[in-house]
Image (spheres, rainbow, N blue to C red):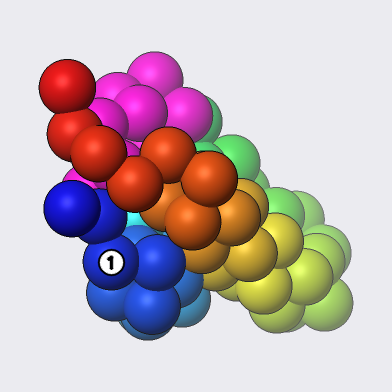
Amino acid sequence: MRNPGLAAVLSLIIPGAGQLYNGRILAGILWLIITPGLWIGSGGLLGWICHVVAGYTAYSYARDHRVRR
């Protein structure tokens, strides 16, 4: 069973970690690449938004797809 709360916390700490926990390897790698770029490119403004979106997407995927395959 996937834990949606754990997926969200992992992605809030390290964007992409929650997606990797969910088994979404490509999505996790993309978050790991995109988020630092937005932190640097926008001076931090878009980095916070990216963190929140990464956490929400990890949470919602884990909530909707409870069983690992």
Amino acid on which the number 1 mark rests in the picture: Asn
Q: In the displayed structure, would residue 45 be above or below residue 28?
A: below
Q: Main secondary structure of the magenta part?
A: helix
Q: In the displayed structure, would residue 68 be above or below residue 51?
A: above
| x then y, percent, for residue 24 | 35, 28
Q: Residue at x 63, y 64 (%)?
A: 56
Q: Is residue 61 magenta?
A: no
Residue 60 seen in the figure: yes
| x then y, percent, for residue 31 | 50, 43
Q: Residue at x 38, y 78 (%)?
A: 5
Q: Nearer the viewer, residue 61 or 27?
A: 61
Residue 43 seen in the figure: no
Which part of the image, by quadrant, shows the C terminus?
top left
Magenta residues? Answer: 20-29
| x then y, percent, for residue 1 | 18, 53
- The local crowd at label 1, few if under 14, some if 14 to 19, many if 20 or more residues have their Cα within 10 Å, is some
Question: Which quadrant of the view contains residue 28?
Answer: top left
Q: In the displayed structure, would residue 34 be above or below residue 56?
A: above
Q: Nearer the viewer, residue 35 or 66?
A: 66
Question: Which quadrant of the view contains residue 13?
Answer: bottom left
Q: Which residue is disc 1 drawn over?
A: 3
